[in-house]
Image (cartoon, rainbow, N blue to C red):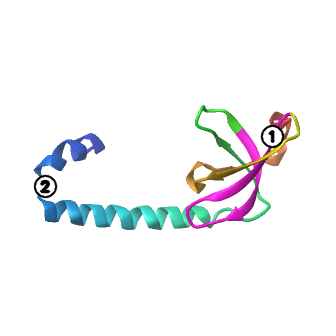
Amino acid sequence: MTFNDIITNLEKLDCQQLAKLNAESARVWNKKNKHASFTFKKGDEVRFADENGTVKFGTVIRCGQKTMKIEVESAEGRTAHWRVNPHRLKHVNKLFEKKEKK
């Protein structure tokens, strides 16, 4: 069964089945989200794409359960803080990506 099949068949479920599906999807989401946050720690260099698709480079300054606080320095030398879901973060490969950052 594909994802589109699941979405199409939601109308066929009764309220009890929808509630069970909602609870199970929330459980799986929380398990995956919690695991993702453990892969980063304070001081890690990371990259992520903002809402426009622009890649940002920064440093993890706080690790929360749902979001990481990332310090990003702009080309002008200004510092901005971003709250980013850990699923959107990637560790920076210091050997290859550091050149792209500057």
Q: Say which quarter of the image contains residue 3.
A: top left
- Please tell me whether residue 28 is drawn above or below residue 56 in the rendered image: below
Mark 2, residue position: 13
Label 2 crowd (10 A; few <14 / some 14-19 / many >=20): few
Quarter of the image with the C terminus in it: top right
Q: Find the magenta span and give its range.
A: 56-75
Q: Which amino acid does label 2 sit on?
A: Leu
Q: Is residue 81 left or right of residue 78?
A: left
Q: Is residue 62 left or right of residue 4?
A: right
- Please tell me whether residue 94 is drawn above or below residue 29 in the rendered image: above
Please say whether residue 18 is one of the residues in the magenta stretch: no
Horizontal and vertical percent for residue 47? Answer: 70, 45
SS state under label 2: loop
Mark 1, residue position: 96
Q: In this view, does 92 lie to the left or right of 38?
A: right
The foreground one among 11 and 74 is 74
Horizontal and vertical percent for residue 86? Answer: 60, 56
User: At x 65% / y 59%, what residue is drawn?
Assistant: 68
